[in-house]
Amino acid sequence: MADEGNHEGRERSANDNRTPDGQNVGADASERLDAVVLSIARLIGKQMAREDFAARIAANDNRKAKAADDD
């Protein structure tokens, strides 16, 4: 046998799901989705922290009354 099937660049795995131009589209979409989910989670976390901070300030309001109450 002169040709043993060793052709560089022509071997492909049986489960190769890449497009013909070689881009791995599934991984790109997955990475973008992960980035979006993390971004949304950060925004939700920041909002929860703001609400918690505001609630703590309201619950711990030991300041003197305004000047209008001093009349």
Image: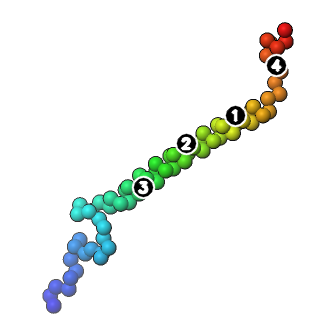
Q: Which residue is mark 3?
A: 31
Q: Residue furthest top?
A: 71
Q: Residues within 10 Å of mark 3 (few under 14, many from 20)?
A: few
In this figure, which colouring scheme has been used for the structure? Answer: rainbow
Q: Which residue is mark 4?
A: 65
Label 1 sits on what residue type?
A: Ala
Label 1: element kind = helix
- Disc ID at residue 43: 2
Q: CA distance from mark 2 to mark 3?
A: 19 Å
Q: CA distance from mark 2 to mark 4?
A: 35 Å
Label 4: element kind = loop
- Residue 48 found in image quarter: top right
Label 3 sits on what residue type?
A: Glu
Label whose residue precedes the other's in the sequence (2 or 4): 2
Q: Is residue 9 above or below residue 23?
A: below
Label whose residue precedes the other's in the sequence (3 or 1): 3
Q: CA distance from mark 1 to mark 4?
A: 19 Å
Residue 37 vs residue 5, the one in the foreground: 37
Label whose residue precedes the other's in the sequence (2 or 3): 3
Camera-nearest label, 2 or 4? 4
Q: Quadrant of the N terminus?
A: bottom left
Q: Is residue 17 above or below residue 7?
A: above
Label whose residue precedes the other's in the sequence (4 or 3): 3
Q: Residues within 10 Å of mark 1 (few under 14, many from 20)?
A: few
What's the residue at 16%, 85% (across, down)? 3
Camera-nearest label, 3 or 1? 1
Label whose residue precedes the other's in the sequence (2 or 1): 2
Q: Which residue is mark 1?
A: 54
- Mark 2–mark 4 contact, CB under 8 Å? no
Q: Quadrant of the C terminus?
A: top right
